[in-house]
Amino acid sequence: MSTGPELTPEQRESIANALYAGQKIAAIKQLCELSGLGLKESKEIIDRLEADLRRAHPEKFTVTRSSGLGCLMVLALLGGAVLLFILLRR
């Protein structure tokens, strides 16, 4: 967070770990509490940090951006299969 507030290495690591785990809102809250910055400014800093971390360490991210879409597609396919099964049994 080169353009952000001065944080200890432990605080920076905690925020980065939240981002790696897909907990962006928690990272924003942490930055707000630790730095005294407002929500908008904290979100902008976290957005930049997340982009930097994704470029530098994509393998550390446990949750991908498209994982929600993938789950939705699986549910839609399962729902369609169940509906087809019910209709064919009649």
Image (cartoon, rainbow, N blue to C red):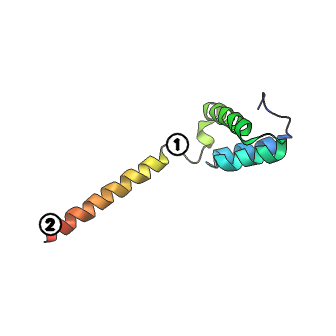
Identify which amino acid the numbered label 2 is placed on.
Leu
Where disc 1 sits, the SS reads loop
Q: What x and y, as percent, mark residue 28?
A: 71, 44
Number of numbered discs on residues:
2
Q: Which quadrant does the C terminus fall into?
A: bottom left
Measuring 37% from the left and 57% from the top, which residue is drawn there?
A: 75
Q: Which mark is residue 65?
A: 1
Identify which amino acid the numbered label 1 is placed on.
Arg
Measuring 48% from the left and 48% from the top, which residue is drawn there?
A: 67
Mark pair 2, 1: CA separation = 37 Å
Measuring 79% from the left and 32% from the top, which residue is drawn there?
A: 4
| Outermost residue, top side | 3
Q: Is residue 39 above or below residue 88?
A: above
Measuring 65% from the left and 46% from the top, which residue is drawn there?
A: 24
Drawn side of residue 88 relative to residue 50, left or right: left
Q: Which residue corresponds to mark 2? A: 88
Residue 10 in view, yes or no? no
Q: What x and y, as percent, mark residue 65?
A: 52, 42
Q: Are marks 2 and 1 in contact (CB under 8 Å)?
A: no
**Sequence-wise first label, 2 or 1:** 1
Q: What x and y, as percent, mark residue 6?
A: 86, 35
Drawn side of residue 90 relative to residue 46, left or right: left
